Image (cartoon, rainbow, N blue to C red):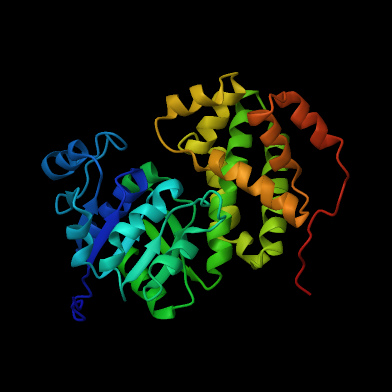
Amino acid sequence: MTPNEASQQYTIAILGGGSFGTALSDISAQKGHKVNLWMRSEEQVRGINEDHINHRYLPDFNIHPSVTASTDINDVVASADIVLIAIPSKSFREVVQRAAPFLSGKIVVSTTKGIEPVTFDLMSEILREEIPDARIGVLSGPNLAKEIVAKAVTATVIASEDDDLCETVQQVLYCDYFRVYSNHDTYGVELAGALKNIYAIVSGMGAAMGMGENTKSMMITRSLAEMSRFAVTLGANPLTFLGLAGVGDLVATCTSDLSRNYRVGFALGQGKTLQEAEEALGQVAEGVNTLSQVKQKAKELDVYMPIVEGLHKVIFEDFKVHDLVKNMMNREQKTDVEFMVR
């Protein structure tokens, strides 16, 4: 289907019935685009189509009434001009493979902030492997879904080497409460979104234990240094981490109880087990899945990541949180800012 160039209206398929996928469907519909939302649950589909509410993830908000939902993934993507994917990383490849026959040549944008187990593939890499002829982008930033559907002002980043793709996504999603900036460093933008989830868990733990403002500031700043150090080793641009997808997203998820990873960390800081914390959350916390993968990759690459190492000990090796903080303070004092523009 060719979009109407005069009105610049598109048919948008959104794969994923979670909070962020629902928020994106609401924005797109508000802009006058035709929006089809794929969800696994028949009950959730009825909630969208009949009540215009995602009863499971966003029960307090009405979604634009023109959004239609379906459990038929082929029907949802077949007529789409643009496909936005908001699926947890562990299911991402399987969903893409199901939709792949209908994605050839289309704009396909991942919004998933995670890393695939075993392969260490980011979601854009999965897209290139499964649909090599698609036009691929990544959307990431400080985008807490409940604030978006409440129309609180925020911004995001669309990353792709395809300038026309970036301009199209900016046109589709931009509105008076949601700004969309572009970036060519797809890998850096995507990796920043995945890595910050780890540090949101640490921040949640610290908040539950009464961490002071100085400590919070130190933790977030050293987290930024650690994640950028790791990303640059893998080929990302360090300047990407000074933008919305880096420090912007990190601050949002490390300071808000709307962040799933922050809430998991808070529960752990209260003395709950990981299983208890995840059950109470009722949603996927990508940071837990990402943690083990990043720790292993950092070891392979010999990248210094003391926060990742310490959190892994707390979650998986029964290490005490107080000992994590104490060990950090006893670590070698390295340079403050590692990547300088001369």
The percent coordinates of residue 171 (x first, y second) are 32, 71
| Residue under the image location 56 percent in, 19 percent down | 272
Q: Which image quadrant: the C terminus? A: bottom right
Q: Position of residue 330 (x, y in %)?
A: 87, 35
Q: Residue at x 22, y 70 (%)?
A: 10
Image vertical order of residue 178 relative to residue 131, above or below: above
| 322 to 120, vertically: above or below | above
Whether residue 274 is visible to the viewer of this picture, yes or no, is: yes
Residue at the extreme left of the image, as rendered? 50
Q: Viewer-proximal residue, 95 or 54?
A: 95
In this rendering, position of residue 155 left or right of residue 249: left
Q: Is residue 324 left or right of residue 186?
A: right
**Residue positioned most to the top:** 271
Identified at 20% across, 56% down, the residue is 36
> With respect to residue 30, does 282 lie above or below?
above
Judge by depth and name the residue closer to the eye, 145 or 136.
136
The residue closer to the viewer here, 304 or 55, is 304
Total marks placed: 0
Considering the image in quadrants, where does the N terminus appear? bottom left
Residue drawn at x 70%, y 48% is 221
Q: Nearer the viewer, residue 99 or 250?
A: 99
Asked if residue 27 shows in the view, the reply is: no
Asked where in the image residue 132 lies, by quadrant, the reply is: bottom left
Question: Residue 310, percent across and down?
Answer: 73, 36
Residue 269 in the image: x percent, y percent? 61, 24
